[in-house]
Image (spheres, grey):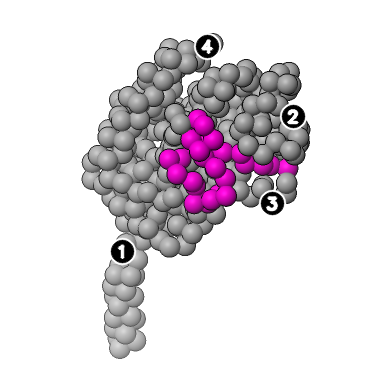
Amino acid sequence: MHASRRRLVGLATGSLALSALPVRAQTLPETARIFAGFAPGGTVDVTARRVADRLRDVYARSVVVENRTGAGGQIALSGLKAAAPDGLTIALTPMSMLGIYAHTYKKLPYDPIADFMPVSQAVRFDFGFAVGPMVPATVKTLGEFVAWAKANPKDANFGSPAAGSVPHFVGELFARTAGIAMNHTPYRGTQPAILDMMGGQVAAVSGPVGEFLQHLSTGRARLLATSGARRNRFAPSVATFAEQGFAEIVYDEWFGFYVPAKTPAETVTKLSGAIGAALAAPEVQESLATMGLEAKPSTPAELAALLKRDSERWAPLIRAIGFTAES
């Protein structure tokens, strides 16, 4: 009897300990997914993975990143639209796929406002315009590139991470303002475009500044300009478009986290707080800085207002350029 009593006491004590210690773990969902619409190694992918690392065992036991590439980021957002509104499927997307595509596509597979709930801004960044081996090493400024493009019209082309993205339009605005014709080639992310540029298949690439940083030391990628109002802190030796006579080309962009529409408000608030804490971690900020990204978390309401502002800003510019996804 004494032994049995000891065993019962031990079992009871163990049960209490078991119920007390992992209560938080038991309440966490097993798996959450973050959809990234662009190729591994790029800025969207890296940002998603840094945040996913910090959300594990905080928001869900496991947080995995899925690279759903294609259609300029639309595949990932289409997947998000179809997901259950339980907060366990998240997408990280550049503003372009929400604020610009609405003005360039006659029909999108999603409604940028009705189908998604904003959670938090992730990062902000400037764009860069870079050239590769197809362009002579003597070309070091935008003015010199313009002269080369006019002398070599068949080779004057540029790549961007997606047709209808902000980097695409930055390149188009530069070409129009400079009075040159540049053929545009869309890619599934900036890294594939840069690799083709470094391999001599495309002359130039317009994309986030951070996408170029790891390649500059090779000498096969040369950054000619950045798009911010002031010099980019990650490439301070590179003059801005404005400094080089293109005063109207002053643009930046952001990535934001979204969940499906009808996700409960309390879930969105919880996720937003967890993402904000992840982005506030010094090691996350330092890691993102190596990619030219500035961590910028926000509330869901702030992200909604940001998307509205940028969408309204770009609408008249897109009409002026005359670009549509079918053009």
- Which amino acid, mark 4? Glu
Residue 15 x/y as whole percent = 31, 71
Split into 4 quadrants, where in the image is the C terminus? top right
First of labels 4, 1 by sequence position: 1
- Which amino acid, mark 2? Gln
Magenta stretch: includes residue 287? no
Q: Which mark is residue 217?
A: 3
Which residue occupies the foreground of this view, 226 or 311?
A: 226
- Which amino acid, mark 3? Ser
Residue 74 x/y as whole percent = 48, 27
Residue 240 x/y as whole percent = 51, 40
Cα–Cα span, label 4 and label 1:
54 Å
- Which amino acid, mark 1? Val
Residue 272 x/y as whole percent = 31, 48
Taking the spot 62% from the left edge, 17% from the top edge, the residue there is 181
Cα–Cα span, label 2 and label 3:
20 Å
In the image, the segment drawn in magenta is 220-246
Cα–Cα span, label 2 and label 4:
25 Å
Cα–Cα span, label 3 and label 1:
50 Å
**CB within 8 Å, label 4 to label 1:** no
First of labels 2, 3 by sequence position: 2
Describe the element under mark 3 as helix, strand or loop.
helix
Which residue occupies the foreground of this view, 195 or 145?
A: 145
Residue that label 2 marks? 201
Image quadrant of residue 197?
Answer: top right
Residue that label 1 marks? 23
Residue that label 4 marks? 326
Taking the spot 70% from the left edge, 30% from the top edge, the residue there is 203
